[in-house]
Amino acid sequence: MPAAPPGRIGQIALSVTDMERSIAFWRDAVGLKFLFQAPNVAFFDVAGVRLMLGAAESDAKAAGTVLYFETSDLDATFAAIRDRGAKVAKNGEPHFIAKLGAKDLWMAFLEDPDGHVFALMEERANG
């Protein structure tokens, strides 16, 4: 009998250079639910998936990892997170991405204090 495939993603890790600054950013600027902290790690709940912040082994950041957060009001969520201190990524203002049948995909891109890019995404009814 073949093994079952993996299930849903349970945790995503990001390396950070300043743990306290990063905890404050993801909790206060982005608004994620802080779960707990242990030596060199901190955990947040993102709709049932854990986001783990881990102390970076060096000053190098992880490249290529983008977190995509769904939202029902892209413009308001983007403005709130930006106004609470997130840097807008290059070409990161809310913009149209693609038609998805009866909906349009819109995204916006921001950065955390370590330069990790994260996105907000909304599927809007078109027409």
Image (tube, rainbow, N blue to C red):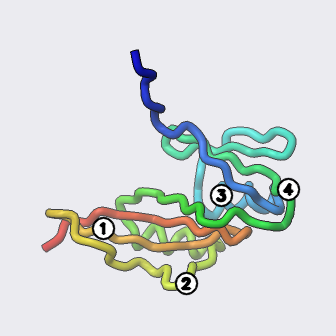
- Residue underneath mark 1: 105
Q: Residue at x 56, y 72 (%)?
A: 110
C-beta proximity under 8 Å, tags 4 and 3: no
Tag on residue 57? 4
- Across and down, in percent, residue 102 comes to 15, 63
- In this view, the residue in front, 23 or 40, is 40
Q: Specify the quadrant of the image occupied by residue 84.
A: bottom right
Looking at the rendered structure, the kind of residue marked 2 is Lys
Q: Which residue appears at 59% of the width and 51% of the height? A: 32
Q: Amino acid at mark 4?
A: Glu
Residue shown at the point (55%, 65%) measured from the top left: 118
Mark-to-mark CA distance, 3 and 2: 20 Å
Measure the C-alpha gap from mark 4 to mark 2. 27 Å
Work out how far the residue at label 2 is from the one at label 1, CA to CA, in angstroms.
Answer: 19 Å
The answer to which of 36 and 40 lies nearer the viewer is 40
Secondary structure at numbered mark 4: loop
Comes first in the chain, label 4 or label 3? 3
Dot placed on the residue nearer the N-terminal end, 3 or 2:
3
- Taking the spot 41% from the left edge, 77% from the top edge, the residue there is 94
